[in-house]
Image: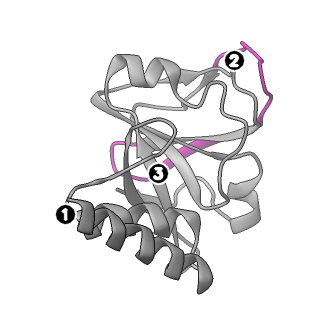
Amino acid sequence: MRLTRCFVFALAGLMAATGCSQGDDKMAAGQASGKPAVHSESGLPVVPLKVQSGGRTHTFMVEVARSEAEQAKGLMFRTQMGADEGMIFPEQTPRRAAFWMRNTVIPLDIIFIGTDHRILNIAANAVPYDETPLPAKGVAIGVLELNGGRAAQLGIKPGDEVRW
């Protein structure tokens, strides 16, 4: 066990020195130990998520909020998030989702994903602490949260495909 931890920390240091992202560090740590990567702050599993947009693939390392309690907390109280990090809220039963920004410190892009894994709509740059509901424009199987403005920066738009 101790040798595995040393290997993981050495691997993380090597990746940082070579310019790999923080998300890559988290994923590598999980792969090196043979267990799923876990976010150091939330304790949630971290998985790769890909968005196909305009012939390009954008990869994010996202925390998975599965339980009702995890989804209720989401990114509340978080003061920062890496450029290629986010949180996915998978729905066990597809539904018309709506999110708000209660106790959320950083602006977010809230991306609603339809049953065909395509983006329904994006609530861009959702305002911190705002309790106005931001609804999906259809039935969603998941909701992706990224840093505010990131979707526009990368050209991510409704109709793009999302896989995790």
Residue 32: percent from left, percent from top? 27, 70
Question: What amino acid does circle 3 point to?
Answer: Val
Residue in the picture at 25% in, 66% down: 4
- Dot 2: what SS? loop
From this view, report whether residue 37 is shown above or below residue 51: above
Task: Work out whether mark 3 precedes mark 2 in sequence or the reverse, and give the earlier one.
Answer: 3
Does the CB distance between marks 3 and 2 fall below 8 Å?
no
127 within the magenta span: yes
Magenta segment boundaries in residue numbering = 114-133
Residue where numbered disc 3 is placed: 62
The label number, if any, that marks residue 103 in the structure image: 2
Q: Is residue 145 visible?
A: yes
Q: Is residue 19 visible?
A: no
121 within the magenta span: yes
Task: Work out whether mark 1 precedes mark 2 in sequence or the reverse, and give the earlier one.
Answer: 1
Task: Work out whether mark 3 precedes mark 1 in sequence or the reverse, and give the earlier one.
Answer: 1
Disc 1 crowd rating (10 Å Cα; few below 14, some 14-19, many 20+) is few
